[in-house]
Image (cartoon, grey):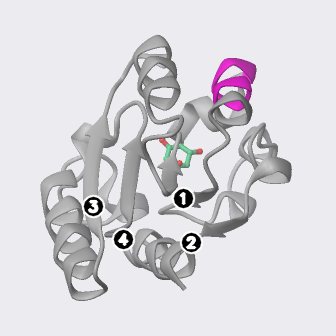
Amino acid sequence: MTPMIDILHGPNLNMLGTRQPEVYGHDTLEDINEQLIALGSELGAVVRCFQSNHEGHLIDKIQQLRGASDGIVINAAALTHISIGIRDALLAAEVPFVEVHLSNVYAREPFRHHSYLSDIAMGVISGFGPTSYELALRALLG
Ligand code: DQA
C-alpha cells in the first residue's frame, strides 16, 4: 500500500520567505511543500501538508491522523518549546514522527534548546533549512 506521510507546520511558518530570511531562508512554505510532495511521489509515497498558527488546530489534526497516517514530519515551530498538548496528541496518535527545524535551534537562544517532542520522536533534524524536512521524509520512508 502507498505510504501516507503528513507534514505539519506550526505557527508563523506561513510567513516563510519574508520572515527573518537570514534565519529561515527565502523559500516560501508553498515551495517547501511542493518539493516534499514531489520527493514523496519519487519515493512512492503520498505527502499531505498542513499548517496552522493555532495549537488546538494542530492537536485536532494530529488526533485525526491516528490510524490514518504512516508517518508525520512536524515542525511545531514555537510550540515545540512550550506545548505539552502537542506532545500528548502525538503520544495518543501513535504515529511515528520526526521533529524538524529549519534553523539550528541549539545555536540560538537558550529557550529554544528545550523541546517537548524530542524524547518521543524517532529523531530530530535541525539546522538544514528546507533540507531538514527532506531528510526527515527520507528517514520515515527508509
Ligand atoms: C523553528 C525554530 C523555533 O524555535 C521557532 O520558534 C520557529 C521555527 C525552525 O524551524 O527553525 O518558529 O521551528
Is 108 above or below relative to 58? below
Does residue 19 sit above or below 93 in this rendering? below
Residue underneath mark 4: 130
Residue 110 appears at what percent x and percent y? Answer: 80, 45
Disc 1, ligand 1: is the CB inside 8 Å?
yes
Three-letter amino acid code at the position of disc 2: Gly
Q: Residue at x 35, y 69 (%)?
A: 1
**Which range of residues does the magenta coloring cover?**
84-89
Crowdedness near tag 2: few (<14), some (14–19) or many (≥20) residues, C-alpha within 10 Å = some
The nearer-to-camera label among 2 and 3 is 3
Gap between marks 4 and 2 measured at Cα: 9 Å
User: What residue is shown with label 3?
Assistant: 47
Query: Is 64 or 35 nearer to us in this picture?
Result: 64
Q: Would you say the residues marked 4 and 3 are in contact, meaning their CB atoms lie under 8 Å apart?
A: no
The span from disc 1 to disc 4 (Cα, nearest Å) is 9 Å
Q: Nearer the viewer, residue 24 or 83?
A: 83
| Tag 2 near tag 1, CB within 8 Å | yes
Q: Is residue 82 left or right of residue 140?
A: right
Task: Find residue 22 and name its label.
Answer: none
Name the element at disc 2: loop
